[in-house]
Image (cartoon, rainbow, N blue to C red):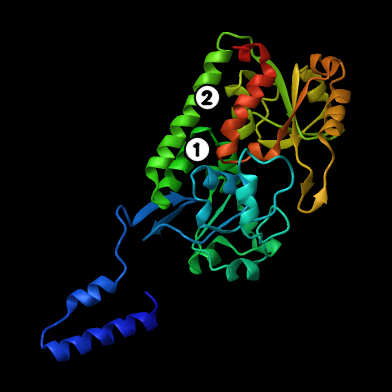
């Protein structure tokens, strides 16, 4: 309760006491904020214990998968500011909600420190620690904590080691934690159930089929920007009925020699699709696919020119990455989706 309002309430109580010769605790008690059922709640994130006395109501989101996840939970009315997203298509029904939320950054990154702290947010949701790096001019996690704007990092992407340890179950953990933080645990469990159902459907469709050998790349004539055997993209390939040809490479997004890519003989290629990065135009997916095919020119994928442009937003923690498993499975095993 603001200090001015608290003083007015106390003054009113003292006046009633003097006139009625009896205390007036009811008037004071009824004016005080009532605790919400189920609060306070505490969760762990990035080695920090975050405690919330009430659900956040003025949220700032970073890279788009963070916003998408809150919208999927029906929490669009809690979001007071968002970053820019123009790299690929929006999830169905979300563009309209996106347009109604004030934009506070012209790129996918959070705004600079002074602008970020001026938002007065009571919660910040993002997908990686890069947006809280003092060297980049951003408000740090410690500064935001001190300002009452605690950040939460989706997927446990709090360090390079934790990025490698990501599993799809981490997305369910995030949804469950956000359900607790915002006081909507039933919504979170319902959404988790729906997502588990989607994965179960994919698993049933691809079961017994020969896994397709997949190269996941992001361009480069040598070395190649590619995805190794750790992290989100590797998890999605496996869940979709594929086998990552770079599974023996310890890394998520990393550089791989042209020789290794050429020898991998992929049968299909996933290309990270995004139009811009921090305000700069990026190579198109067809151009990056052509680079991969030129390197693996004798592979089945190159001979068939078989690739899928995968929105890079799906390769970051958030609701979208589980949805993308269906898209990848449909690309790898089209015959499994004819029924």
Q: Which secondary structure, mark 2?
A: helix
Q: Label 2: how many residues lie within 10 Å, few (<14), some (14-19) or many (20+)?
A: some
**Pair 2/1: label in front:** 2
Q: Are marks 2 and 1 in contact (CB under 8 Å)?
A: no
Q: Which mark is residue 170?
A: 1
Task: Locate the N terminus by quadrant.
Answer: bottom left
Asked if residue 16 is positioned above or below residue 242 in the image, the reply reads below
Q: How many marks?
A: 2
Report the residue marked by disc 2.
199
Q: Nearer the viewer, residue 25 or 289?
A: 25
Residue 222 appears in the rendering: no
The picture quadrant where one finds residue 124 is: bottom right
The picture quadrant where one finds residue 157 is: top right
Q: Which mark is residue 160?
A: none
Asked if residue 142 is positioned above or below residue 96 in the image, the reply reads below
Q: Label 1: how many residues lie within 10 Å, few (<14), some (14-19) or many (20+)?
A: some
Where residue 7 appears, x then y in whole percent?
Answer: 33, 84
């Amino acid at each position: 309760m603001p200090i001015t309002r608290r003083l007015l309430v106390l003054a009113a109580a003292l006046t009633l006491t003097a006139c009625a010769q009896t205390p007036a605790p009811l008037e004071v008690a009824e004016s005080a904020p009532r605790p919400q059922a189920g609060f306070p709640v505490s969760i762990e994130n990035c080695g920090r214990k975050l405690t919330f006395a009430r659900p956040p109501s003025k949220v700032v989101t970073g890279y788009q998968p963070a916003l998408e996840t809150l919208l999927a939970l029906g929490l669009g009315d809690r979001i007071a500011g968002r970053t820019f997203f123009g790299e690929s298509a929006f999830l169905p029904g979300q563009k309209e909600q996106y347009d109604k939320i004030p934009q506070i950054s012209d790129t996918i990154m959070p705004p600079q420190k002074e602008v970020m702290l001026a938002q007065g947010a009571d919660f910040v949701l993002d997908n990686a620690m890069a947006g809280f790096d003092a060297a980049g001019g951003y408000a740090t996690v410690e500064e935001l904590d001190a300002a009452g704007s605690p950040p939460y990092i989706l997927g446990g992407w709090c360090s390079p080691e934790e990025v490698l340890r990501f599993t799809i179950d981490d997305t369910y953990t995030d949804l469950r934690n956000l359900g607790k933080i915002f006081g909507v645990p039933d919504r979170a469990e319902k959404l988790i159930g729906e997502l588990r159902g989607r994965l179960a459907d994919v698993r049933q469709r691809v079961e017994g089929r020969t896994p397709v050998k997949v190269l996941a790349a992001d361009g480069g004539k040598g070395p190649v920007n590619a995805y190794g055997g750790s992290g989100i993209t590797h998890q999605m390939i496996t869940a979709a009925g594929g086998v990552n040809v770079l599974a023996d490479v310890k890394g998520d997004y990393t550089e791989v020699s042209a020789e290794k890519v050429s020898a991998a003989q992929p049968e299909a290629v996933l290309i990270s699709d995004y139009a811009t990065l921090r305000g700069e135009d990026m190579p198109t997916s067809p151009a990056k696919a052509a680079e991969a095919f030129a390197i693996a020119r004798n592979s089945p994928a190159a001979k068939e020119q078989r690739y899928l442009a995968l929105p890079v937003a799906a390769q970051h923690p958030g609701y979208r990455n589980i949805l993308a498993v269906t898209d990848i499975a449909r690309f790898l095993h089209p015959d499994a989706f004819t029924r």
